[in-house]
Image (cartoon, helix red, strand yellow):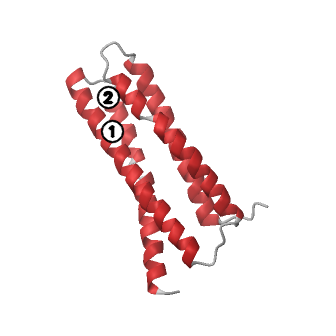
């Protein structure tokens, strides 16, 4: 295995960690948001948005490095676990676009149901973790699906 390929694997794994890890910080943030006032809540929303932005950018690196690994490595685009991972990635992109930003915008409105939105954000976070964990499992296990 050449050194460039190994470096891209490292970048791919690191970007996967950065794509998933910060999601767990959101649970602590959501817990604090339950008891925050409007001023503090704005700061928490800003932090929440920053974490989601970090996750998105890490996802871009993850996709780019994954493409390079398929091009340079022994895997074909027709490999079942790669096709499944790409399908889940497309689903997760659409999910991510609707899961956080609209709810965070509603939280900034004074007449919003804060507790309901926090519950929805928590559910969205767990759902997104589940999608990412499934993609991670496909990449690590590389199962023969068909």
| Nearer to us in this view, 105 or 18 | 105
Q: CA distance from mark 1 to mark 2?
A: 10 Å
SS category of the residue bearing label 1: helix
Q: Which residue: 47% across, 39% down? A: 97
The number of callouts visible is 2
- The spot of residue 58 in percent (x, y) is 40, 56
- The spot of residue 31 in percent (x, y) is 36, 31
Q: Which residue: 47% across, 28% down? A: 120
Q: Is residue 133 above or below residue 72?
A: above
Residue indicated by mark 1: 48
- The spot of residue 29 in percent (x, y) is 33, 36
* Name of the residue lying farthest toward the right: 146
Residue indicated by mark 2: 33
- Left or right of residue 34, residue 4 in this image: right
SS category of the residue bearing label 2: helix
Q: Which residue: 32% across, 28% down? A: 33
Judge depth for marks 1 and 2 and give the one in front. Answer: 1
């Amino acid at each position: 295995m050449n050194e460039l390929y190994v470096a891209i694997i490292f970048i791919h794994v690191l970007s996967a960690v950065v794509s998933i890890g910060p999601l767990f910080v959101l649970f602590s943030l959501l817990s604090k948001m339950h008891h925050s006032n409007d001023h503090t809540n704005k700061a928490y929303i800003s932090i929440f948005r920053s974490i989601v932005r970090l996750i998105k950018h890490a996802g871009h690196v993850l996709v780019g490095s994954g493409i390079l690994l398929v091009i340079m490595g022994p895997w074909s685009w027709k490999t079942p676990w790669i096709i499944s991972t790409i399908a889940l990635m497309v689903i997760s992109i659409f999910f991510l676009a609707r899961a956080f930003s609209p709810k965070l915008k509603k939280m900034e409105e004074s007449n919003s149901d804060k507790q309901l939105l926090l519950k929805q954000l928590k559910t969205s976070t767990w759902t997104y973790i589940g999608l990412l964990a499934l993609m991670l499992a496909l990449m690590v296990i590389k199962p023969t699906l068909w």
